[in-house]
Image (cartoon, helix red, strand yellow):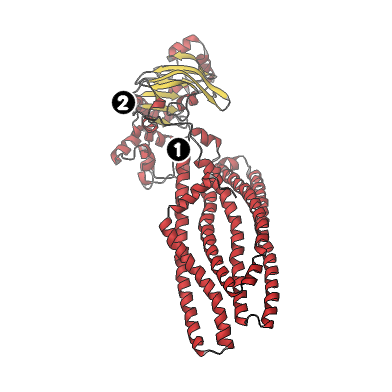
Amino acid sequence: MVLKDRHKRLLEMVKDSWPKLVIAMGCMVVISATTAATAYLIKPVLDDIFVDKDVQMLKLIPIAVILLYIVRSLAMFGQQYLMSYIGQNIIRRLRNDLYSRIQDLPLAFFQEEKTGGLMSRITYDVNIVKNMVSGTVTGSTKDCFTVIGLIFVIFYQIWQLALIAFVVLPLAFFPVVALGRCVRRVSTGCQESMAEMNSFLHETLAGNKIVKAFGREDYEKKRFFDRSLSLFKLEMKEVIARSLSGPINEILAGIGIAFIIWYGGYHVIAGTYTTGTFVSFLAAVLMLYEPVKKLSKLNNAVQQGLAATDRIFDILERQSDIREAPNPITYPNRPHRVTFDRVFFRYEHDMVLKGIHLDVQPGEILALVGTSGGGKTSLVNLIPRFYDVTEGAIRIDGIDIRQASIASLRQQIAIVTQEPILFNDTVKNNIAYGNSHASDAEIKKAAQAAYAYEFIQSFPQGFGTRIGELGGRLSGGQKQRICIARALLKDAPILILDEATSSLDTESETLVQKALENLMEGRTTFVIAHRLSTISHADRIVVLVDGQIVEEGQHDELLACEGEYCKLYRMQFSNGFNEKAAGLGP
């Protein structure tokens, strides 16, 4: 088996704990020595006590056995504790590295990968590696030492029989290797199937309201049962491959031991060997085959662990498309000018933005409108470098954002998305997510400005109330206002509002719109909106169609042109909605 560089990195992590590893190996040596000594003591027990009737040995050997097992027990505890510590610590580091790497990868990665699959790597796959590191390293090292000790005993006792005992060992090597390869291949399939199941569970449990609303419980049950059956079949293939190595080794061991009994028994009868010598030899051989069988089974665990290691390192070795500049600059915290210089952006195989040129002045409010799929969200996602431009450049204060520190760039930007994203934490911590050093007074002020303070105060624990997974205990409007309060508290000079008021009712929208107007003052603001009532007072409105700017200007100017904006306007208000009340009428 050829180890890849990633597997060697895992071994390097084991070596990092070398002081504990050395002590643990010392304990393993003691365990192996006491095992070999136990086999050797059978000879004086039989020959000196039962055959020669030596009273002195009758007193000494039981004491030696007690001391032997006390030492053995202490060594076993030390070995198990130290190796478990090493294994658990390695897995902690591996899990931390994996999560850290996932967090550092760009937004495109999360759109390619399934959330449940990533969760499976951090939990299920890492646990498999833990079993390999904790169990396999411990077991293989201890069993190797035990084999060495017992080999010394059997060669010391009857070297001719010892040579015969080793004839069957090479025969056991070939099926072990073949079955190990099969285990690794099937184990990879099991891990991928488990990742698919985690993704499925994440989707259906998070979207349970829709499942129930459309009466699709039976449909989702059937989909889950199909996945469960597929996983079951793969697991049974793995069980077959793992279970075959044991019986094969048992057969070979039985043949070897049977021959030893026949050959050795003949020589005992003939008087060549004493009874104690032969029984001690036979006991050592029996004890020898046990660790050898364990070593063959460990190969299956190693193959399974290496398959999991490959899946983990596929993520750890993934390179991000969003690269930090060698000597990045830091943006000052002040109003900024944002320039799109002939920006093209390709997502997968489609060119989403085509030659965008925009110059947004400090403090200007720029509204982006257009039909779905026009490229509005893609355009604003380029500003914080969730993606990088395919061609052209985006500049802040004349500096290409790719030359700036990513952390510094994103510190200048606050975002309120169309889908309110909150965490299963307190209201206070969700609002302070972008400004962890904010005081209680500042958090309260932000909540008041977002018109969230009143409903927060109605909660049993107020700002200390936990809001549930994804804010599940809040209404849509409440969640959005918490998100707006979060953006208010961050107080960033560049503001991106992606349908920020879409989840609010008319009354809440009016209040929050006022809060947003105060927030936008003095800030460079990008507003994406389908509801034209929210952007009528923007300094400039840009109409995007198929990734291109087709119109730009103020509301009244665009209406007078009777172009794309006018079409959107008429479509939205063709139901007789009061245009003047919306602030859009002439």
Residue 473 visible in this rendered orientation of the protein: no
Residue type at numbered disc 1: Asp
From the viewer's perspective, is residue 453 above or below residue 338?
Answer: below
Q: Nearer the viewer, residue 195 or 310?
A: 310
Which numbered tag is attached to residue 334? Answer: 2
N-terminal-most mark, 1 or 2: 1
Query: In this image, 13 relative to 327: left or right?
Result: right
Which numbered tag is attached to residue 104? Answer: 1
Judged from the image, the secondary structure of the residue bearing numbered disc 1 is helix
Q: Nearer the viewer, residue 503 or 353?
A: 353
Looking at the rendering, which quadrant does residue 250 occupy? bottom right
Place of residue 73 in the rendered image (x, y in percent of width and height, measured from the top left): 47, 71
Residue 153 visible in this rendered orientation of the protein: yes
Place of residue 533 in the rendered image (x, y in percent of width and height, measured from the top left): 45, 22
From the viewer's perspective, is residue 40 above or below residue 102?
Answer: below
Judged from the image, the secondary structure of the residue bearing numbered disc 2 is loop
Residue lying at 53% horizontally and 15% vertically, measured from the top left = 567
Looking at the rendering, which quadrant does residue 49 occupy? bottom right
Which numbered tag is attached to residue 153? Answer: none
Place of residue 406 in the rendered image (x, y in percent of width and height, measured from the top left): 40, 31
Place of residue 360 in the rendered image (x, y in percent of width and height, measured from the top left): 39, 18
Name the outermost residue toward the top: 561
